[in-house]
Image (cartoon, rainbow, N blue to C red):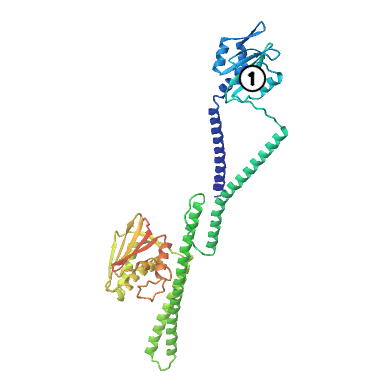
Amino acid sequence: MKWKLTGRFLLSVVIIVVIVLIANIIILIATAVVTRDYPAKITNSPENFTRSFEENISIKEGKPLLSDQGVEKLREANAWIEFLDTNGNVISHTFAPPEAPTHYSPVELVNKYRYSEGKGYTSYVYFKDDISYIINIQDPETFRYVGVWNLKQTFGWISSYTLYIIIADILITIIIAFFFGRSLTKPLSQILNHIQNLRNREFTTIQPRKGLYGEVFHNLSEVSNALAMQEKERAQLEKMREEWISNVSHDMKTPLASIRGYAEIMQDETSTKQELKSYAGIIEKQSMHMNDLLEDLNLTMRLRNQQLPLQLQQTNMVTFLREMVIQLLNEPKYEHTTIHFMPSTENLYSEIDRHFMERAMYNFIYNALRHNDEDVELTIAITVEQHELYIKIQDNGKGIEEEDLDHIFERYYRGTSTAHTDGTGLGTAIARDIIIAHHGEVWMTSIVNEGTTVHILLPQLIVT
């Protein structure tokens, strides 16, 4: 951004210089075009005409003679000529008007040369040998004036003019600097204000802008939106954590209350041996539930901190999953469950920690069985997709609402449609983290009243 600003400023300066140069060139070209005939006009000026007219005059025996060419030139120039002797007397003339004087004093000759007569013609006085001649040219575009040059006044005028130029340049510079600085500082002020809002956790949206700071405003808007989303997720996570802590506290208090109650009953000497054995079994069951809860808490913290020690070993995933299905169907609770196991081949290998992977797979399978009706059917398929093992666990049960599906892998989350709340609320999140720890991927799709599918990708191990 620093170099971009510098480059933009230098580019502005270069553009201004180029514009000034182009303007100067245009002025020079225009001046050249306008004044292209000026040398010729100077050559044909009345002054040059009279200076070169001498060649048309000859003196013979002290008398001036005008050539025919000279007469023609006078006619074309709309001029007339008078010849004077040394005393100022007019001795001859050509085309002179009747009212022309016949004698000129030295003062009259000087005034005639210095000033226009005000009659539409200008006089030029020259001489050849002892003969003086006056050429009078009628030309309204030509006039003569007398100027007086005062050096001190001239320098004073130049100084004043220079001062005015400097003041004007300063004003122009201030105006340009104001608008240029405003165009720079106003967006910067807005950027600083937005950063202040971000620091105060006020995630406002910035209107998109174009120009130099467009990218900055776009990035700030993206950051603001991302932080707003993270803040929303953090608040939601905090709410779920509080609910989970409340549920865990309740889950801990329930077995503790049972253990304490049955322990007090067992102290009653009137209890029979059979009753004591029954009470001891209930205490054992509740203590195991508490142990599972504490293990889940410990495991989820280790997974969160990526401190899960995996004991990887080469495993045929087809055999691994088949044994899990058989073990599940051998449980009395699920002996009537319909499970379809569909491997694409009998030998598909991967490196896994059998204990943790079994826990992850059972979590998905048990969820499909617990949260659906007893007649639910399960399909477990395994195949190869783009050099990865693709495991699909699909049921035809109730399905999951879209709102719950978006949070299904989050810790502490229980869906609103979940009927069973005897778990710890960490099972799905732990299963997801176990898959990720094996460098795999997992996601879930579901359609309400049609069923849910868990998709798992694991690295394939090629065994020769």
Q: Disc 1 marks which amino acid?
A: Tyr
Whether residue 453 can be seen here? no
Res. 100 in view: yes
**Residue placed under numbered mark 1 in the picture:** 124
Residue furthest top as drawn = 61
Residue at image coords 54%, 17%: 76
**Does dot 1 land on a helix, a strand or a loop?**
strand
**Residue 42 versus residue 199 in the image, above or below:** above
428 or 302: nearer the viewer: 428
> Camera-side residue: 255 or 348?
255
Outermost front residue? 99
Judge left or right: residue 432 versus residue 1: left
Q: Is residue 370 left or right of residue 60?
A: left
**Residue 371 on image: x %, y %:** 33, 72
User: Residue 301 or 397: which is nearer the viewer?
Assistant: 397
Q: Is residue 234 left or right of residue 52?
A: left
In the picture shown, does residue 233 fall above or below 143? below
> Image quadrant for the C terminus?
bottom left
What is the total number of numbered labels drawn onto the structure image?
1
x and y, in percent, of residue 442 in the image? 38, 62
Residue 392, image x, y percentages: 32, 63
Image spot of residue 78 (x, y percent): 56, 19
Residue at x 38%, y 60% (from the top left corner): 458
In the image, 106: left or right of 224?
right
Q: Which residue lies furthest to the right in this view?
A: 152
